[in-house]
Image: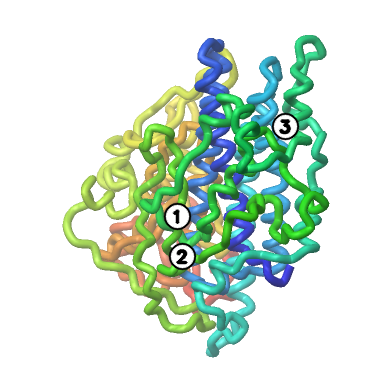
Amino acid sequence: MSELDVVDCIAAVVSAFHGGAELMRALKKRNKKRKTEQAYKEKMLQEALMAGETQVKRRYAEEFNQLGVAFSKGDDSARHQLLAIAVSMQAEIIRSLQIAGEVENAILDLTKLHESAVMNRYSTVKTMEELRQRILIRIPIGSPIKDYELTALEASHRMPSDPTMTSATANAVAPDCIPSAVTIPEQGTRRGSLSRMFSMRGNNNSGSSRDRASSFSSETEYAPNSKWKYPIPMYKDSQLAVKRFWPDNRRSISTASDHSSDKRPSILSVSSSSDSITPDSNGPIQAFYPNISPDGSDYLPSFDWSKNEDTRPPLVRTNTRPILPAPQPMHGRPCKQNNYWNFCKGAWSARESIKKGLEIHMVPDGLFQLVPHWQCRSCEFRSIAVGKAKALDPRVYKATCGISYKWVFLAKSHVRNKSPTATKETYSYGCVFCSVDNKETGIYGSVDMLMDHIYVDHAGNITPGVAKLTDCVVGRVAGPEEAFDVNIPFLPEDRHYHDDQS
């Protein structure tokens, strides 16, 4: 496993989310006559898979920009966890959708697949967050990281070739297993088709194999599109990586015993004699990524990672955290043209007036009940309304770094979220303190990440004017009846302060 990096494992997880979303798209297109409830569940599953791909990419990009090669290499713990997630998605989601595409009367448990997609997305983000914390702890104080002298290009484009890992991942899923989310009725089952899907390897250059490909699998082919650029290494044989989830000739996922020369983990690609691994000469940030939509439209946010010049100083451990690039100053009012400086439009409006940015929405809970929620007027960010008065959540929450906050602070900090199935664990946030300082905010994938940033970068520099603008109580514990959005009870230099002290 020494040659397998976290960035390779992330690429496998992203490919799984992408392949699942495309398989689901093809299934929806084929099943035109379906009940309303079934269509809704299919839509929810597809959106969960698309959101998983987007969020995992974005979170990796954030961590890579901050920690560089240290994060892309990672450690054994992160690699094991991410590979387990990729194999789990391959065994449950990808294989279930493949069977549904091959067997006409196969019954999918879409609710179970949706839960699996959401949990795998959450587990991936959590694994990256834990890796980040371990990296920050391991960095020697006051000295550069000598263990990560590899250039970003070398680290991002080195293809794994550990035979042990190849065998382990290839045999992680039995070739003839049927996932628990799939039910195949005994009568009318196309067992020949199912058997071919699991056992037939085929030849890429064989005309007969291509002739046998079903319309379902042929619809899922696509070409690379250089428009999307990410620090996740999508190699120039990236079509193979996705085609392994989506065989165009009904071949099964190959095992290590099929080709002894295959040295890559099966979750990353399928080997072929006609394909060569050629790293992109433009660097780790620039890589080809396939188009998601068959009509050429792109659902991913317009991130541009084409600027790959790394002008940052070496990653150094200080008393707080490694040196990061300075935030860019904001110019002009928040508007659609500048993407509201990374916040949601509703978050800006909520700072002026709660009812300007939020409104009551009735959200279905089960089949016969509607529950009132405070929801952003511009996106799907929301939280349950409290009591008969439908008040904002008044509870005080506490982050791991010791900062206390109320939900209204998150409402004023949230980043636009378009998925109706998103949960509080999957929301992202910007920093209101950065915006008050007229600096463009980063995007933080969890509340703890946001609070860590506030504690390290802002806690010691909050002036009375900034505290008033942000409804912040700093340097002491807020009183039980005191109004505030966020409370920083102690400063970084007083980190041993306890909340129960007066």
- The amino acid beneath tag 3 is Met
| Label 3 vs 2, first from the N-terminus | 3
Q: Distance of mark 1 from mark 3, alpha carbons?
A: 29 Å
- The amino acid beneath tag 2 is Asp
Q: Distance of mark 3 from mark 2, alpha carbons?
A: 33 Å
Q: Which residue is under mark 3?
A: 197
Q: Residue at x 55, y 38 (%)?
A: 49
Crowd tier of the residue under label 3, counting other residues whose Cα lies within 10 Å: few below 14, some 14–19, many 20 or above: many
Label 1, secondary structure: give it.
loop
Judged left or right of residue 300, residue 398 is right
Decide: marks 1, 2 in contact (CB < 8 A)? yes
The image quadrant that residue 287 belongs to is bottom left
Q: Distance of mark 1 from mark 2, alpha carbons?
A: 8 Å
Which label was assigned to residue 24? none
Residue 218 in percent (x, y) is at 54, 31
- The amino acid beneath tag 1 is Phe
- Given residues 157 and 92, the one toward you in this image is 157
Judged left or right of residue 106, residue 248 is left
Colouring: rainbow
Q: Which residue is under mark 2?
A: 280
Residue 91 in percent (x, y) is at 73, 40
Q: Which residue is under mark 1?
A: 288
| Label 1 vs 3, first from the N-terminus | 3
Q: Quadrant of the N terminus?
A: bottom right
- Given residues 9 and 416, the one toward you in this image is 9
Crowd tier of the residue under label 1, counting other residues whose Cα lies within 10 Å: few below 14, some 14–19, many 20 or above: many
Q: Residue at x 60, y 35 (%)?
A: 207
Could one spot residue 465 in this view of the protein?
no
The image quadrant that residue 88 belongs to is top right
- Given residues 427 and 7, the one toward you in this image is 7
Q: Nearer the viewer, mark 1 or mark 3?
A: 3
Residue 356 in the image: above or below residue 236: above
